[in-house]
Amino acid sequence: MPLSRRLTTGLGMATVTALAAITGAPPAVVAAPAPAHVTAAREAASWLAGEFTDGSLPGPFAPEDWGLTIDGLVALSATGVDAPTRQAATAQVARHVRSYNSYDDWGIEGFTDGGATAKLLYAAAAADADPTDFGGYDLRAETLSLIATADAGHQRGRITSRTTADSGPDASNTFDQSFAVLGLARSGDLPQDTVDFLIRQQCAAGGFRLYPDAADGPSPSCDDQPGATLDVDSTAMAVQALLAAAEDGATGAGDAARKGADWLVTQQHTDGSFGGSGPTTGANSNSTGLAAQALAAAGRDDEAARAAKALAALQLTAGNGGAASADAGAIAYNTDGFTTAAAAGITDTDRDQWRRATAQALLGLAQVPLGRIGLDPPPTSNPTPTGTASPTAPATPTASPTLTTSPPPTGTAGPTPSVTSPPATPAPTTAAPTTAAPPITTPAASGLGGLPTTGAAIGSYLLIALLLIGGGVTLLVLGRRRAG
């Protein structure tokens, strides 16, 4: 080996040895700042956590809205924010299973809502609770008992409701079916019939319809229903459920999920936002949040990033919130809602809409798939350096439309669960928001950003610099001698 190479090698070894001696450990890894959308998601979750009271979120007509509380629980779990609130919410939902999936509280017995039961099953699994003993209920067994069997013909595999009265066609929809697939996949074996029924709600174009029924009764498939309305929200839910099913080994699920994601891309507005169908056609954060989450789950990162930017444009910050700056972190349903709040604050009447919008929208910022919430570590604002243990936190989207159950009107044969998105709010009429996304700041004082350091004293750096300079001079002298 030439002398110069030996000296260079020796110099490198001396430098490494000196550095190890100085620091007493390998050099620390400098963590890159968290993506802006992750920080935005955690800020939204922190705001939402502040809206909980004794483990529940209120509704417009009741002190507890269990469907919204479940959405909030899932949203907090997706971000890993506020473990005490998540634990309290999990306990409260477990105590009120029948308040959510039945009409027992209104004195109407003998009814079990299939969609609500499936959503409870998913929430229990995603919150790292035992779905076979959640508040004393075996939600997996209950959900399986509500799945239509082979004698139901083309309705086999469908999640249905149980009732002692003749209430007409079942009200379950594609959201309910997606929760059934997600919950069953997360809690044990996933019946192929349940997946097949969900796939039959997909039209040839790739999108999914919201309702499996036509005007004259259940239709065998989306393509068998003339003029079926394809829905962004339903498609986003189905894509995520089918990705979880594909991971579980279900036949046909992966291809259907990819086709659904392709269709979602065609529905994205130029500013990255999405709208739903019917009364939610206008660009809104609920649809955008679900679509962004589904696109990220399907590996469509560019489109998911554009959707996240559109969501950030609807998030209140200390800088853009105006009269609503005290509610920094909250996400508006649409541009009109954002503008109104910035001018006059969030009123008590509007606060319900902000809770519902934020719970779902932040899923598109966190971008943890529904099938992975509670399984993968939630995204953190400061990534853990390589070689160190990641912090753990209890974990578990969601739902838009949010499934709500209301007592049946007087004179009706049975209860009719309604699907609204968002509940108790007027239909949006605004076009896609065109405002630029406000800057998302991560001040060092907040613990969400700043310049990380290795922790070594400055004297260490000076000694290393002297070693390197000395080595360079030595090599220069040797090189001159060799040239002469």
Image: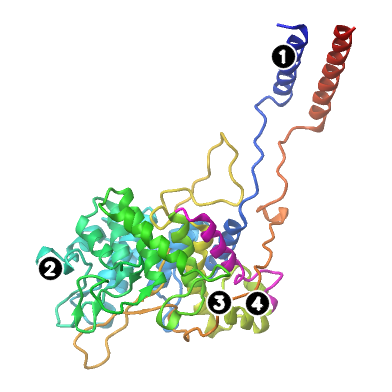
Return the x and y of residue 481 as percentages of the image width and height: 88, 7
Under mark 3, the amino acid is Ala
**How far apart, in angstroms, are the residues tagged by discs 3 and 2?**
42 Å
**How far apart, in angstroms, are the residues tagged by discs 1 and 2?**
76 Å
**Which residue of the protein is positioned furthest toward the left in this rendering?**
151
Res 414 → quadrant:
bottom left
Q: Mark 1: which secondary structure?
A: helix
Residue identified by numbered label 1 = 9
Under mark 2, the amino acid is Gly
Return the disc, 3 or 4, that comes first in the chain's sequence: 4
Under mark 4, the amino acid is Ala
Figure quadrant of the N terminus: top right
Answer with left or right where residue 194 lies relative to residue 24. left
Q: Is residue 465 magenta?
A: no
Using a 10 Å C-alpha cutoff, classify the residue at mark 4 as few (fewer than 14 neighbours), some (14 to 19) or many (20 or more).
many
Residue identified by numbered label 2 = 153
Under mark 1, the amino acid is Thr
Q: Is residue 315 magenta?
A: yes
- Pointer 3 and pointer 1: residues touching (CB < 8 Å)? no
Question: Colour scheme in the image?
Answer: rainbow
Answer with left or right where residue 129 lies relative to residue 395. left
Residue 432 circle label: 3
Residue identified by numbered label 4 = 324
Figure quadrant of the C terminus: top right
